[in-house]
Image (cartoon, rainbow, N blue to C red):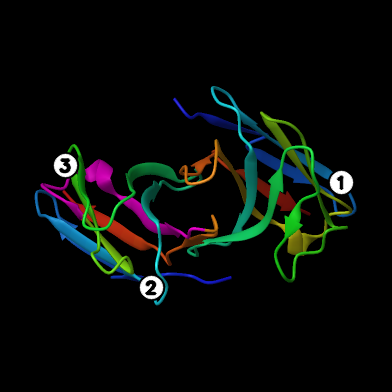
Amino acid sequence: GAVVSQHPSWVICKSGTSVKIECRSLDFQATTMFWYRQFPKQSLMLMATSNEGSKATYEQGVEKDKFLINHASLTLSTLTVTSAHPEDSSFYICSARQGGGQPQHFGDGTRLSIL
Amino acid sequence: GQQLNQSPQSMFIQEGEDVSMNCTSSSIFNTWLWYKQDPGEGPVLLIALYKAGELTSNGRLTAQFGITRKDSFLNISASIPSDVGIYFCAGQTTGNQFYFGTGTSLTVIP
């Protein structure tokens, strides 16, 4: 149980393109979903927290107009990297939590490469 | 955001040896979690701890929630090559704030 699916696994695109990443909880309803960014050999850095039906809460230093988050249902959240540039290249990971006090369960991540 | 202090940063051990790593914080947590991340994949939950003093096992893995609620450790017994990866601790506060450890990279030499 507690499976989180993230799609796509890997994206390579030109600078200036907008990229959408999907995160789905497959066998549970996620009241809260999280988006992380991870650089090589580093820990996960929280970008934003989203609750279903409300606006995401962004961490300090994360541009909300650059990283658009939509959490339209209890099983789906999307992260759109708008007008992506090479410095946005990274490993993006989502997680989902069923309720307060419950563990976060992670997707397999999306490797984004901007040329 | 805040990160938990995790040690050691990396370990190189022989297959069959036991492994111990720990995580400390200046803050109190309600929940301690241990995850393993393989290259190019997301973290996978190994053990969740909900009560101070709790000792929980998952196969060859054992984790404990420290009495002070500011630390936790993870032990792996009789390591095997597939134990290779990065292990992260995570703590969750009463306000549902979630913090990750800095990670321990484990290499098992056959």
What SS does tag 2 mark?
loop
The chain holding disc 2 is: B
B80 left or right, relative to B106: left
The residue lying at 63 percent from left, 42 percent from top is A32
Crowding around mark 2 (Cα neighbors within 10 Å: few <14, some 14 to 19, many 20+) is some
Pick the quarter of the image with the C terminus of chain A. Answer: bottom right
Residue A20 falls in which quadrant of the image?
top right
Question: Mark 1, mark 3: which one is toward the viewer?
Answer: 3
- Seen from the viewer's position, the closer of residues A104 and A63 is A104
Q: CA distance from mark 1 to mark 3?
A: 44 Å
- Seen from the viewer's position, the closer of residues A59 and A114 is A59
The residue lying at 43 percent from left, 67 percent from top is B102
Give the mark nearest the N terminus, 3 or 2: 2
Residue under numbered circle 1: A18
Residue under numbered circle 3: B60
The chain holding disc 1 is: A
Q: CA distance from mark 1 to mark 2?
A: 38 Å
Residue under numbered circle 2: B25
Question: Which amino acid is tagged 3?
Answer: Arg
- Seen from the viewer's position, the closer of residues B92 and B11 is B92
Q: Where in the figure is residue A5, as x and y percent of width and height?
A: 59, 30
Question: Which amino acid is tagged 1?
Answer: Ser
The stretch in magenta equals: B75-94
